[in-house]
Image (cartoon, rainbow, N blue to C red):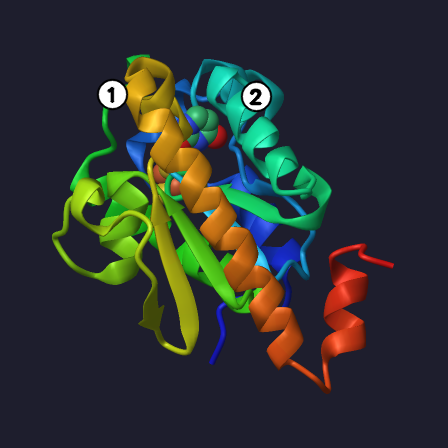
Amino acid sequence: MRDWESLEDVYNEVLNCKKCALHKNRTNAVFGSGNDKAVVIFIGEAPGYYEDLKGKPFVGAAGKLLTKLLKSVDLSREQVYIANVIKCRPPNNRDPLSGEIDICKKYLYAQIDFINPQIICTLGNLATKLILKKNVGITSVRGKLFRVGGRLVLPIYHPAAALYTPSYLPSLEKDFVTMKRVLDKQIELQIEDEVESKEQLGLF
Ligand code: URA
Ligand code: SF4
């Protein structure tokens, strides 16, 4: 049995969630944004300063880069869905604790369940380990395609890592091209659902 009836139910619970200590310092919980029927979902780590203020994911410097990378493969933020593993900002942007992840991850899983994307792009180590359920480093798996529970998973460097270490940028750009190729292929393969998927992506 599902814990929630709809994505909106999950959203309403997250906005008021006090299940871990991170609720104490938040301005806003950050649920996610974009197309709730998206074919591809991007999963980051946790909200930062600006995300906490605005209640939206990836609105700071890393978000600007994410938007640019999407645009480089002809996608807009409205065509995809963007979320994080952790919904409330950790103090001083510290790494989320494993206990916090264990409590909060059910919301992300519910988002994936309701949105039902065919492709999951994990941004950086935390989301990649969680979704692949493996203790792998992002450097060894980025740009490679995995299948988890019927979905394709493509791990990619976190945009913030490329801001900090600009030498990651070419790999990041390349992996976005891979993501777009996989996305186009998935749409092509879905002959019966094709019309619907293209509509979801706003392709016509
Ligand atoms: N970094 C993340 O992982 N998520 C955000 O929403 C912003 C920055
Ligand atoms: Fe709830 Fe997650 Fe926020 Fe913790 S981080 S209070 S579990 S929504």
Identify the residue shown where x is 54% and y is 58%. 181
Does 66 sit above or below residue 178?
A: above
Toward which corner of the image does residue 197 lie, by quadrant? bottom right
Label 1's element? loop
Please give left or right for residue 70 compared with residue 100 in the image.
right
The answer to whether residue 103 is visible is yes
Q: Residues within 10 Å of mark 1 (few under 14, many from 20)?
A: few
Identify the residue shown where x is 81% and y is 74%. 195
Label 2's element? helix
Identify the residue shown where x is 46% and y is 41%. 17
Please give left or right for residue 196 compared with residue 168 in the image.
right
Three-letter amino acid code at disc 2? Answer: Lys
Please give left or right for residue 1 compared with residue 92 in the image.
right
| Image disc number at residue 180 | none
According to the image, label 1 marks what residue? 94
Judge by depth and name the residue closer to the eye, 90 or 190: 190
Image quadrant of ligand 2?
Answer: top left
Of labels 1 and 2, earlier in sequence is 2
What distance separates the C-alpha of mark 1 from that of mark 2? 21 Å
Q: Residues within 10 Å of mark 2 (few under 14, many from 20)?
A: few
- Outermost residue, right side: 204
The answer to whether residue 158 is visible is no
Coordinates of residue 55 in the picture (x, y in percent):
59, 27
Does 83 sit above or below residue 60?
A: below
Coordinates of residue 133 in the picture (x, y in percent):
21, 61
Judge by depth and name the residue closer to the eye, 131 or 67: 67
Please give left or right for residue 44 compared with residue 144 in the image.
right
Three-letter amino acid code at disc 1? Answer: Arg
According to the image, label 2 marks what residue? 64
Coordinates of residue 98 in the picture (x, y in percent):
18, 42
Coordinates of residue 56 in the picture (x, y in percent):
59, 30
